[in-house]
């Protein structure tokens, strides 16, 4: 897992179009889960206690939200007990590759030949 990102790309129109048909509650949960994933640098624990604390909601509410967001492919439960999102994984990987390239360039830039 990589270090968390202090910010992430956000395309407002893509989010609006991609969440069309979600309730306000579902959208709020979804963007909060995405923010937690970006902050973690990848998938987050699929723990009712953790998620309910994050979303400040009751377990029954989280179960309903998890079921719906999972069915729609917005969040993906993994076999090893995490929640992920395909777009987030792509963006985090891309950001890590960019960091590595910049780090190498900075090292090369400081070398005297």
Image (cartoon, helix red, strand yellow):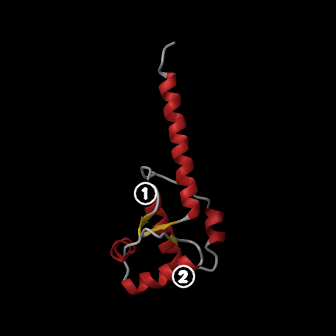
- The image position of residue 16, as x and y in percent, is 63, 69
- The image position of residue 100, as x and y in percent, is 51, 38
In the rendered structure, find residue 2 and report the number of the disc placed on it.
none
Between 82 and 52, the one nearer to me in the picture: 82
Would you place residue 60 above or below residue 45 in this image?
A: below
Would you place residue 98 above or below residue 48 in this image?
A: above
Whichever of callouts 1 and 2 sits on the residue coming sooner in the sequence is 1
Q: Residue at x 53, y 71 (%)?
A: 75
Residue 56: quarter of image: bottom left
Please identify the residue farthest to the top as the structure is shown. Answer: 113
Q: How many marks can you see?
A: 2
Please identify the residue farthest to the bottom as the structure is shown. Answer: 60
> Which residue is label 1 attached to?
39
> Which residue is label 2 attached to?
68
Residue at disc 1, secondary structure: helix
Could you tell whether 57 is left or right of 100 in the image?
A: left
Residue 40 seen in the figure:
yes
Could you tell whether 45 is left or right of 26 in the image?
A: left
Pointer 1: residues within 10 angstroms few (<14), some, or many (20+)? Answer: some
Q: Residue at x 44, y 83 (%)?
A: 63
- The image position of residue 31, as x and y in percent, is 50, 68
Residue 9 seen in the figure:
no
Q: Residue at x 59, y 61 (%)?
A: 87
What separation in Å lies between label 1 and label 2 (alpha carbons)?
Answer: 23 Å
- The image position of residue 13, as x and y in percent, is 65, 64
Between 15 and 110, the one nearer to me in the picture: 110
Residue at disc 2, secondary structure: helix
Pointer 2: residues within 10 angstroms few (<14), some, or many (20+)? Answer: some
């Amino acid at each position: 897992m990589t270090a968390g990102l202090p910010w992430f790309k956000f395309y407002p129109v893509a989010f609006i179009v991609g969440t069309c048909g979600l309730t306000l509650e579902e959208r709020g949960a979804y963007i909060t889960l995405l923010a937690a994933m970006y902050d973690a640098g990848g998938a987050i624990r699929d723990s009712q206690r953790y998620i309910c604390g994050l979303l400040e909601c009751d377990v029954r509410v989280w179960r309903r939200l998890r079921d719906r967001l999972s069915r729609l492919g917005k969040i993906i439960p993994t076999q090893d007990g995490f929640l992920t999102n395909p777009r987030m994984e792509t963006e985090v990987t891309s950001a890590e590759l960019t960091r590595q390239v910049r780090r190498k360039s900075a090292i090369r830039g400081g070398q005297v030949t």
